[in-house]
Image: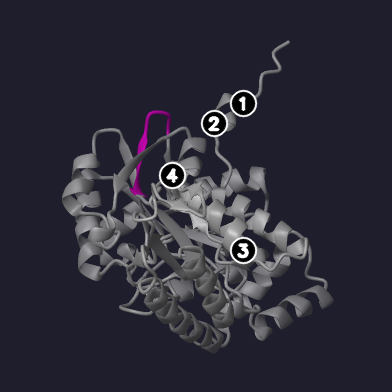
Amino acid sequence: MNNELSQKNMGIAPSVTLAITAKAKKMKADGIDVISFAAGEPDFKTPVHIREAAIDTIEKGLTGYTASAGLPELKQAICDKLKKDNHLEYKPENIVVSNGAKHSLYNAFQAICNPGDEVIIPLPYWVSYPEIVKLADAKPVFVEVPESNGFKYDIKTLSEAINSNTKAIILNSPNNPTGTVYTENELREIAELAVENNIYVISDEIYEKLIYDGEHVSIASFGEEIKELTIVINGMSKAYAMTGWRIGYLAAKKEIASMITNMQSHATSNPNTIAQYASIAGLQGDQEPINEMVKAFKERRNYMVEKINSIDKLSCRMPEGAFYVMVNISEVIGKELKGIKINNSMDFAGYLLDHAKVAVIPGAGFGVDNYVRLSYATSIDNIREGLKRIEEALK
């Protein structure tokens, strides 16, 4: 009898971000006054018209199954949004609605990857990219995007990483964990490279509405060739403060969307019906709550960046989007703080949690050990107090 567990899945690492968040939440539950900069979700309530649409859906009894790839009305609303916001022409047959953008990413790689394929991932990376690629039997290939280059791909380094096994490039703008936003010219260079080498671009645009400097451009909007090679990933979580509602979506050529629809019909069936109806209200309704959220995030970002850069041994660049700051802790690595040797980002995050009662995400979770990520998806009062505690803990 062979009862050995899956070797592939035994090799999948847990999410560092979720682990730190869980520890901070437990400390809070135990009555400890912890300030958390770990959150990957807006601290705003889901807008009222979206909540009301969900309640209305329940009251009307619209709680049964939908088509596995999503409600036709929602897919049409997504097509309308992509046309209006991103200058992208898609039909409902190109859209698959899934259980969050993470599920959409998982589906995308399952659809395009075969054993031996390579997927280029920017380093630092969002924590789940390498694991999702490995789950698709492909190999993550990391291309460093240094802070000195604004945490962006250098086109020469990127082209050098491409070989006959390269299947796709991951592009995430606005970026988690760095807050970087690519310019149109930078995106055009990547698009040319993808078309020239006939490789897919997985364009993760989940933070597109949360931009403070510059504007969001979708790489798929540069013409039919790059559009055919791009799988656009987006969702409701970040822009509409709907993280727990679990609605993500992708737009791709028909062949890919059809395959993903078939996969999803066996894996999960449809995403949450009530959340789908609420998402229609989100996409078609008042967008002012997003503007208010962006305004608050910008104020918090400006304060956080200025304060971090005033703290001895810490520095950061100004992120253009999302709600994260990557803090460079190179000058702290190798030092002792209150008798504790800081060898890496895990040590530093552990020290801050234990001694300053502040939760940050170690850069190790993003593949870079001389950084920690701070989220400003928390109140300005929490930001002030948390950064004050960090400053004191470093004295």
Quadrant containing the C terminus in the rendered view: bottom left
Which residue is label 3 attached to?
Answer: 357
Residue at mark 3 to residue at mark 2: CA–CA distance: 32 Å
Amino acid type at circle 3 is Lys
Q: Position of residue 220 (x, y in %)?
A: 33, 62
Marker disc for residue 87? none
Q: State yes or no: discs 3 and 1 in contact (Cβ < 8 Å).
A: no
Q: Position of residue 222 (x, y in %)?
A: 26, 65
Which residue is label 4 attached to?
Answer: 343
Answer whether residue 116 is magenta in the image. Answer: yes
Query: What span is colored magenta in the figure?
Result: 114-122
Q: Earlier in the sequence, mark 4 or mark 2?
A: 2
Amino acid type at circle 1 is Ser
**Which one is closest to the eye, mark 3 or mark 2?**
3
Q: Earlier in the sequence, mark 3 or mark 2?
A: 2
Check disc 1 and report its element: helix, strand or loop.
loop
**Residue 99 visible to the viewer:** no
Which residue is label 1 attached to?
Answer: 6
Residue 74 is left or right of residue 120, and the answer is: right
Quadrant position of residue 357: bottom right
Residue at mark 3 to residue at mark 1: CA–CA distance: 38 Å
Check disc 3 and report its element: helix, strand or loop.
loop
